[in-house]
Image (cartoon, rainbow, N blue to C red):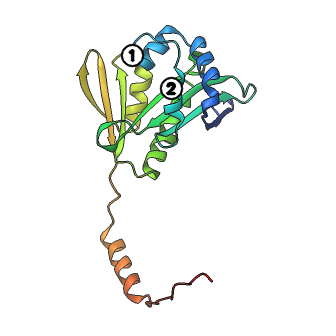
């Protein structure tokens, strides 16, 4: 990914071995950024939490690094199947000096696309009212806000299958009728 200012950012799937680099990222983030991400005081992830986040069965976790320092993470993003109704929760932590460069928006679009491809029913995200960057990204994604109290907002983005036009349905029916039906015998291993 390339930012509007021309900075190249490397994005890859996170692994359990990234925990130390992720916790180093936490040390470079301001208290304000960490409070906005975790909605409270927190300065690191525990090994069990990170293992769950990077488990492919739980969803998807990505790490981000500047191309000139690939071993030094500047952020991470998650799409985890942990919300009610089969929805996935999305989250993003981005180092302060890499914010407001379009990286959060690009990662949000990527996670929305990944959730659609995985045929998830939708996404959930939580923000504090004052987190204007996250609010802007979520509104641009067409997520719907719901105030939950304690200064937090729950955002949901439900997915629907695209509606097929009448012309497309007619073409689909004609295509099915005009195809010859062929029954192929199953091959039997010898």
Circle number at residue 186: none
Query: Tag 1, which secondary structure?
Result: loop
Total numbered labels placed on residues in the image: 2
Q: Give the crowd class for mark 2: few <14, some 14-19, many >=20 residues within 10 Å.
A: few
Any part of residue 12 in sight: yes
Q: Nearer the viewer, mark 2 or mark 1?
A: 2
- Image quadrant where residue 152 sits: top left
Q: Nearer the viewer, residue 17 or 97?
A: 17
Q: Position of residue 103 (x, y in %)?
A: 56, 30
Q: Which residue is at a point 37% across and 23% down the rendered structure image?
A: 127
Circle number at residue 48: 2
Q: Nearer the viewer, residue 125 or 82?
A: 82
Q: Which residue is at a point 48% across and 43% down the rendered structure image?
A: 57
Say if 172 sits above or below 40 in the image. Answer: below
Q: Is residue 87 left or right of residue 90?
A: left
Q: Nearer the viewer, residue 71 or 3?
A: 71
Say if 53 sits above or below 95 in the image. Answer: below
Q: Residue furthest front?
A: 190
Q: In the rendered view of the protein, which quadrant contains the C terminus?
A: bottom right
**Residue at numbered disc 1:** 39
Q: Position of residue 36 (x, y in %)?
A: 43, 16
- The earlier-in-sequence mark between 2 and 1 is 1
- Image quadrant where residue 62 sits: top right
Say if 61 sits above or below 135 in the image. Answer: below
Q: Give the crowd class for mark 1: few <14, some 14-19, many >=20 residues within 10 Å.
A: some
């Amino acid at each position: 990914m390339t930012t509007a200012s021309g900075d190249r950012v490397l994005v890859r799937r996170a692994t359990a071995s990234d925990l130390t680099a992720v916790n180093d990222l936490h040390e470079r983030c301001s208290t304000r950024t960490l409070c906005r991400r975790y909605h409270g005081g927190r300065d690191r992830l525990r090994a069990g939490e990170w293992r769950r986040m990077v488990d492919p069965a739980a969803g998807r976790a990505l790490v981000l690094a500047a191309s000139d320092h690939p071993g030094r993470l500047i952020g991470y993003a998650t799409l985890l199947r942990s919300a009610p109704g089969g929805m996935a929760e999305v989250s993003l932590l981005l180092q302060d000096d890499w914010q407001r460069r379009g990286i959060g928006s690009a990662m949000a679009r990527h996670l929305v696309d990944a959730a659609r491809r995985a045929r998830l029913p939708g996404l959930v995200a939580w923000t504090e009212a004052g987190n204007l960057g996250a609010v802007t990204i979520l509104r641009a994604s067409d997520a719907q806000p719901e105030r939950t109290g304690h200064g937090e907002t729950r955002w949901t983005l439900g997915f629907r299958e695209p509606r097929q036009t009448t012309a497309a349905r007619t073409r689909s029916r004609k295509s099915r009728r005009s195809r010859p039906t062929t029954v192929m015998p199953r091959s039997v291993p010898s």
